[in-house]
Image (cartoon, rainbow, N blue to C red):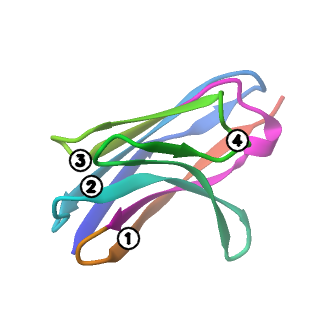
Amino acid sequence: QVHLVSSGGGSVQPGGSLSLFCAASGNIGGGYELGWYRQVRENERELVATITTSGAANYSDSVKGRFAISRDGAKNTVYLQMNRLKPEDTAVYYCNIRIFVPPDAYWGQGIRVTVSS
């Protein structure tokens, strides 16, 4: 079993910055991908950014250049810095861990991000 604890988010005006933090604990194993998705429609979550244990980062085109993901491998944590936020970034964000061996995935609790003037 793996447990994810998320924090951060909040409300900000367009152009502002917010950050998200997620810590994973439990039976994680040696290799995984940790990152963030956001709920854009009911039952649909889209990729925001992920990072693997080797440090390979992946971003959606909509956030590339504005968001930055980083990790602390020793602590199994991931940090998402969100800059130049836009109203369309408004969503509930979910931390996700995808474990490579054996294959498994877990979700953290949702964190609301609101970008509005």
Quadrant, the N terminus: bottom left
Q: Are the two marked residues, 1 and 2, in contact with CB atoms closer than 8 angstroms?
A: yes
Q: Mark 4 to mark 1: distance in Å?
A: 24 Å
In this picture, residue 5 sits left or right of residue 40: left
Quadrant, the C terminus: top right
Residue 107 falls in which quadrant of the image? Answer: bottom left
Q: Which of marks 3 and 2 is nearer the N terminus?
A: 2
Q: Mark 3 points at which residue?
A: 76
Question: Could you say which disc has been placed on residue 24 in the image?
Answer: 2
Residue 17 falls in which quadrant of the image? Answer: top right
Q: Name the residue under label 4.
A: 114
Q: Earlier in the sequence, mark 2 or mark 4?
A: 2
Helix, strand or loop status at disc 1 = strand
Q: Mark 1 points at which residue?
A: 106
Q: Position of residue 30 (x, y in %)?
A: 17, 59
Q: Mark 3 to mark 2: distance in Å?
A: 5 Å
Q: Earlier in the sequence, mark 4 or mark 1?
A: 1
Q: Which of marks 1 and 3 is nearer the N terminus?
A: 3
